[in-house]
Structures are given as C-alpha cells and as structure tokens.
Image: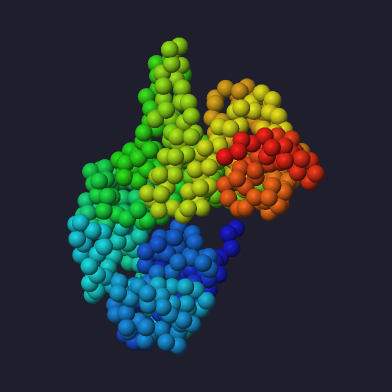
Amino acid sequence: MTPAPDPQNVTVLDDGAVVQLAPAARVIEALGTAFAAAGHELSLVGGPVRDALLGRLITAPEADLDFTTDAHPQAVLELLEGVAETTWDVGIRFGTIGARVAGREVEITTYRAEAYDPESRKPEVAFGTSLAEDLVRRDFTINAMAIRIPSFAEGGAPVLELVDLFGGRADLAARMIRTPGTPHDSFTDDPLRMMRAARFSAQLGFEVAPEVLEAMTAQADRLQIVSAERIREELMKIVMSPSPRRGLALLVDTGLAEYVLPELPLLRLEVDEHHHHKDVYEHTLTVLEQAMVLEDAHEPASGPDPVLRLAALLHDIGKPRTRRFEGDGRVSFHHHEVVGARMTRKRMQALRFSNEMIDDVSTLVELHLRFHGYSGGEWTDSAVRRYVRDAGPLLTRLHKLTRADSTTRNRRRAIALQKSYDSLERRISELAAEEELAAIRPDLDGRAIMELLQIPPGPVVGEAYQFLLDLRLDRGPMDEEMAREALLAWWAARPSD
C-alpha cells in the first residue's frame, strides 16, 4: 500500500491534483504571506510549475524558483526586506529581482506584456496588469501555467490554485509541445523558441505538435538574428539532454541546423549503390549515443561530458569534403579526421566556445582514427608512447570516443575491434607503469640544453628539445648521461646556419 504523502511536503491544488513542493514550502510560505499582506498577487510560474506537475526538480534545493507578481520592481525590493537574506537587481530593467529566501535562490518578475521588434529578439519590456497577460507571452503551454500563492498568515495549509489557461496540463499528459498562441507569432517574437522546442523535446522526451513543426520549418531563417552565444547555449542543452538524437534530428528536419550546425545535415550523404559506406548522419547520432553509455559504463566514470559528446557529434564532419569514389567502386574519406578537426575548430569559434573546449574537441576529432593503425596489434612501444603523448589529458575521452565509433553490424568485426582496443589499453597501462607515460618529457629541460650547448634562448633550443622528445618517445627513458651524449651528437651533426 502506498503511504500517504507528508502534508508538509505537498500542495493540493483546487482541482484535487497533488504536487510535491518540498523543500520549497518555506520559500512559498514566506513570500506568499509577505506579498498578500501588502495587497499584491504572487504566483509560482513557468518551468517550476511544469516540473512540479511532472514530479521533477522542484524538490531539489538547487531547482529554479520563478515567481511573477503585479508588484513593480521597487515595490518587490521593499517587500523582500526582512524576508530575504539578500537581494540583487541586475535584471531590474526587465522587471526581475533576484533574492535568496530561506536558503533558496528565487527570481520575482513583474507581470510583463512585451512587444518585439521583428528585426531583434530583444523585447521592449512593458509591465502588464494581469497574470493572464503575463502567461500568454510565454513560449509553450507546458511553461505557461502558474500556481497562485496565497497568504499563510491564518495558519494551516491553504489550497492553492492552478492557473492553466492554455491546456498546459493536458499537453503534459499528452507529452506534447505546443505554443499558447499561434506558433508563427511566438517564433516571430523570439526565434530562439524554435531551438527551445527541440531542447524540451530532447530533455522531456515530448513530441512537437505538427503546427509547431510547420512554423519551425517556415521560420528557420529567423534564427539568424539570434546571437551565437544564445544559440550555443541551447545547442549544448540539447547535446547534454537525455535524448540528444531527438533534439538534433528536429534541428535537421526543420532546417534549423542550417543556422546552428550546418555541417550536421551535410552528413546525410546518399549511400552509394554498392553500399560501400554507411549513412554518416545516422552513424554520427549512434556514436553520440554510444559515447553517452560509456560516460559511466566504462571506467573511469565521468558523468555527462560535454567535450566527449561534442567530439562524438563532430568526429566525422570532414567526410563530405573528403569523399572520393575510387576506380574499384569503393568510397574513401582520406584524411577526413584532419579536415574535420579544422572544421570543428572553425564552427566552435563561430559559436563562441571557450578556447580550451575548442582545443579539446578538435584534438579528439583529429585523433579519433589513430587507433585503427593498431588494429593488428603491431604497434611498437614508440607508437604507443606517441599515442599517449598526443592525447595528453584527453586520453580517457579518446578511449571512449574510439570505442563508441564502432557501429558495425558485423558482430565478429565489432568483437575484434573491442578486443584490439582492450589490447592497446593494456599496452598503455603496462608502459605507463614503467615510464609514467602521462608526463612524457625530454630527459633534459630547456635550461640544461642551453648550458650543455652554450646557446641563448631561441628557436634552436626548441629544435633541441623536440629532438630529445622524439628520442624519448622512440627509445623510452634515458639517464642524463645518455641524453647528453645523444644531444651533443645531434648538435655536431646539425648543419650550421
């Protein structure tokens, strides 16, 4: 028998629905009492209401809590005195006040009735006068619901009212994404909402209503007025969702990907009549899903990993540019990993990713084929050292990406590839135990090189350093005397300038 819910941790709505609100109850009680005492309306709104009705997130202390009110920002600040531990007003020009109440961060926004310039997604903010006016401007019906917060001053647990003017609860039950008004008007106001539709589909596993898909397709080019930073944020929320394939496929099918990640739809190469190459687009999405499985299933566990997921998504984007039909009917993609690494860097720069993330993802793309030279298990110790040196701190991610990149349906070949990679990992572990591979450096540092050769700082020191590093990779560790002898021999044989 299911135990009765704790009455301190639930809210019973006026239609009999039971919603878990713990541990947000203290915040709701404090704010509801303060705003009601001042004669103002207050409602929990948007994502928190959606997630509460789904039994998600709002029970977590770090969950967002968004409220809306008829009180103007200055009045909100005054009402929060004595209620909030601290407040901040960085969003005040948009009507938003942030605060920490009962240990939780909240945002309280004055009812808004926004007007949009068709050439910009930045609204002209005007304060509204009603909750209904505020809800109709929101992106989707599942985010256009509110729970009115009454005063708790009289004691007890008052019954709260769910405000659902656009069928949000029905759409939650149907697992459907629709807009409160017409999709055309919604996306005209804010084109980024089209990407948000794909994101919520990927995060929640919901379908997108046919009329919404139609509007996304018709208005895809409006995404061009959205900043690269905002597009990047939404793209990464899709990539980091539980079902990125669903969201990415929506971007491709509606044409939005042309303005987000144009390299992705180009992977839909027609399969040649002899079937000598697989569907690169489907292969890519499968590799992404397999990489996600390996985040925790293959040690060391890492949890959701944006670098690994992006590398999986982009690892083959160089194939369309390098595809060649050979004389014997085969299809080749020679050096697609090198071309793909350059394309990855360029696209990530355009989307304003950090330099560190660009370096990491493009390096993984460039190295993702390196393992296939080992498939016969014939690598020398020198080749293994170079593999580890080139991967550097990305070695664990490279292991996972390489394993995920096997999507062959030939079970015998799949098993052989995995065994071969198991063998390579064992070789790496054995050499690492002997030589500390993760920190491979020349046996003499720059200062020792300059002292031995009696040369000042400059390019020649770099040449000498690279010679010693290559020697270390080829031969393994040397003692200092051997390294000095080798360097002097190199110096004596080096042509003078």
Q: Quadrant of the N terminus?
A: bottom right
Q: Residue furthest front?
A: 496
Q: Nearer the viewer, residue 166 or 496?
A: 496
Q: Residue at left 60%, top 53%?
A: 457
Q: Quadrant of residue 159?
A: bottom left
Q: Residue at left 43%, top 69%?
A: 65
Q: Residue furthest top?
A: 328
Q: Nearer the viewer, residue 135 or 5?
A: 135
Q: Nearer the viewer, residue 289 or 463?
A: 463
- Measured from the top left, where is residue 172 in percent x and y? 38, 54
Q: Nearer the viewer, residue 387 or 292?
A: 387
- Measured from the top left, where is residue 415 in percent x and y? 64, 27
Res. 439 visible in picture? no
Res. 341 visible in picture? yes
- Measured from the top left, where is residue 264 in percent x and y? 39, 38
How many circles with numbers are drawn on the protein?
0
Q: Is residue 13 above or below residue 143?
A: below
Q: Is residue 349 left or right of residue 410?
A: left
Q: Quadrant of residue 437?
A: top right
Q: Is residue 388 left or right of residue 260?
A: right
Q: Residue at left 54%, top 49%?
A: 305
Q: Is residue 436 left or right of residue 249?
A: right
Q: Quadrant of residue 99?
A: bottom left
- Measured from the top left, where is residue 331 in percent x and y? 44, 20
Q: Quadrant of the C terminus?
A: top right
